[in-house]
Amino acid sequence: MPSLPRLLRYILLAASLAVGPQGPALAVEGGGLPTGQWLTEDGSGVIEIRPCGPSLCGRIIGMALDGPEEPVPRDVHGRSQCGLQILEMRADEGKWRGRITNPRDGAAWRAEMWLGEDGSLRLRGYLGIPLFGQTQVWTPFRGRILAECRMA
C-alpha cells in the first residue's frame, strides 16, 4: 500500500483536470470562503472549489499533461478525471472538514482545509486524526485552462 504522502501526491495530481476555458482564480469569495481555482502544491493540477449545498466541493479542472497526445487520465471506474469531484467539505470550528478521494483507486481520506494568512489554501489529508497526515499548500491559479483539461 502506498504511503500517505505518495497517495496525497496521486490525489493532487489527479485533481488537476479541466473542462474548458476558465477565468482567473478567485482566491477568496464571499466572506473568506476558500472558493475559486487552486493550483496544487506540485503545480500538476488545478482544483475548482465551489459551494454545493451546505458544503464546498472541489473538482478537477486542469492538469499538466506531458504533451498534446497524452490522454486525460481515467478514474477507478474508467471515467475521465476531467471535471471529477474529489473534495467535499463542511464548515466546522473555523476550518472546513470532510473527505478527499483518490480517483485512481477510489480511496477516500479525511481532510481539513483553511485559508492561510498569505491567501494560500492549506489542505491536510489524514488517517484517523489530523496528527497522522500531511498538509499541502495550494495557491490561487492565475493561468488558463484549455480544452481537454490542459493547463496553459
Image: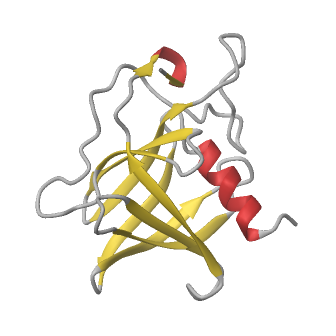
Residue lying at the far front of the rendered structure: 118
Residue at left offset 70%, top offset 42% = 77
Name the side, left or right, on which 152 lies relative to 66.
left
Front-lying residue, 109 or 65? 65
Name the side, left or right, on which 60 lies relative to 70.
left
Q: Position of residue 51 (x, y in %)?
A: 26, 54
State whether residue 72 is above or below residue 77: above
- The colour mode here is secondary structure
State whether residue 61 is above or below residue 28: above
Residue lying at the far left of the rendered structure: 30
Residue at left offset 38%, top offset 28% = 143
Task: Give the quadrant of residue 108.
Answer: bottom right
Residue lying at the far top of the rendered structure: 69
**Where is the N terminus found, in terms of image quarters?**
bottom right
State whether residue 127 is above or below residue 10: below
Residue at left offset 70%, top offset 51% = 10
Number of labels in the image equals 0
Q: Position of residue 140 (x, y in %)?
A: 35, 46
Residue at left offset 54%, top offset 39% = 45
Task: Give the quadrant of residue 107.
Answer: bottom right
Q: Position of residue 120 (x, y in %)?
A: 36, 58
Name the side, left or right, on which 43 lies relative to 54.
right
Q: Position of residue 78 (x, y in %)?
A: 71, 35
